[in-house]
Image (cartoon, rainbow, N blue to C red):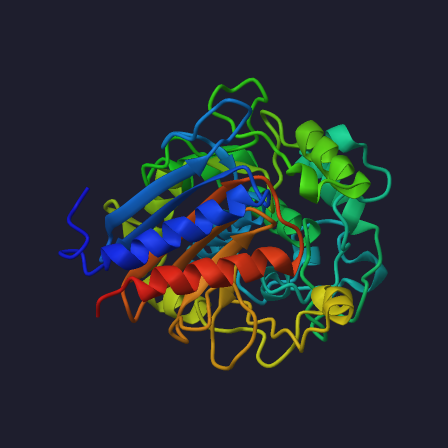
Amino acid sequence: MPDTNVMGLDPNALRRLDASVQADIDTGKNFGASIIVARGGIIGHRAAFGTVAPDRAPKDDDRYLMMSLSKSFTAALVLRAVDHGLFSLDTRAADILPGFGAGGKQRVTVRMLLTHTAGTFAGMLPPGLAPGELGNLSKFVGAISSVPATNVPGERVVYNTAASYAALGQMLVATDPAKRSFRAITRQDLFEPLGMMDTVYGLSQDDPRRVPVSYTPSNTTPATDMAVAAMNAGFVEGAEVPAGSAFATIDDVFRFTEVYRQRGTANGYRLLSPALFDYARQNHTGSMSNGAWDFWREVHGLPDYPANFSLMGGYVRGNGFFLNGAGYTASPSTFYAVGGGSTMWLIDPDRDLTFIFLSAGFIDGLAHFDRLRRLSDLAIAACLG
């Protein structure tokens, strides 16, 4: 491991970061975790904590469920398709996906799907689809196509769990010149070129490196039991859930962040043009709020929650004082992606800092964002300059 002072990282601050991660485990919030802190594309600190399964200590090659961090992989391929002229950000989904425009969704565009403004089906399992069919992309998109829009497309931001990115994934399939499956596209156009050899959408439950889907006893409810059952049934080998079924090691996530840290090119592979990257990393939802958190905010007495969605399957820090996963002290240009209850990657361009957090054991709602805010601020505090 490089000397942290040479890497521009304060070892004492990194110890405080580690202690904060361990404190969550000690208090039963999650079982285990792995982190990476890097500057200038060089890992200056990595650590693993707790357990990832009963009596199983974490290892660098553990394959974590990315949850909605998977969206950042899918978004990268959508942007690549735009760069290659297969469709544009303003292409209507209904022009590519037959039947998708039903129920007021005829004006839904690629841009709306990327920024959670499309008003598509808001749940995880659409009507008429069995839990075991969650990973059948064509059936999933067929099911959501007939569901009416929940709001006028483009007028509201409401974080969309699965449907919008399923539509994007199917658009990649429908416009692919080689007529490949979604999993083949992700493997051949993203994972293999970037050296992400341990990353895949859908993974066998028998894979010895798979980190099981779990909640700690203090976080378990009947609803979480149902969620675990659905993910275990749907996120198996072969499952194509563009919004949430990717599994990856922490080093593969780091390899992915490198292509964004370097404005679209890494490992000798140009994924995106610098021009499209610079455009995509901006806040594309303006001053709109994320309506998905309205009930949570009301219950917990929290102020308005800016959406700040980029086109990259995640968020932009932006300006102002508000709860966010990047931290209060992150540069306004910081962009990041979050996986529900368990994962995050962050890039602060002004500090050339990359921070990755993967955990075993979910924390639901904005409590996960509050944890990420705390850990991100601690990682940023380790920067010496």
The C terminus sits in image quarter: bottom left
Location of residue 365 (image quadrant): bottom right
For the question of whether residue 134 can be seen, the reply is no
Q: How many marks do you count on the picture? A: 0
- Determine whether, in the image, residue 186 is placed left or right of residue 293: left
Q: Residue at x 50, y 52 (%)?
A: 72
The x and y percentages for residue 159 are: 67, 61
Q: Nearer the viewer, residue 183 or 134?
A: 134
**Quarter-of-image position of residue 367:** bottom right
Where residue 123 appears, x then y in whole percent?
A: 77, 50
* Residue 206, percent from left and from top: 56, 17
Q: Nearer the viewer, residue 81 or 256?
A: 256
Whether residue 27 appears in this view of the structure is yes
The quarter of the picture where residue 232 lies is top right
Foreground pick, 144 / 13:
13
**Residue at 64% over, 73% down:** 305
Q: Is residue 158 left or right of residue 47?
A: right
Q: Residue 215: horizontal and vertical position, in percent?
A: 65, 38
Q: Can you say which quadrant of the picture contains the N terminus?
A: top left
Q: Residue at x 52, y 48 (%)?
A: 24
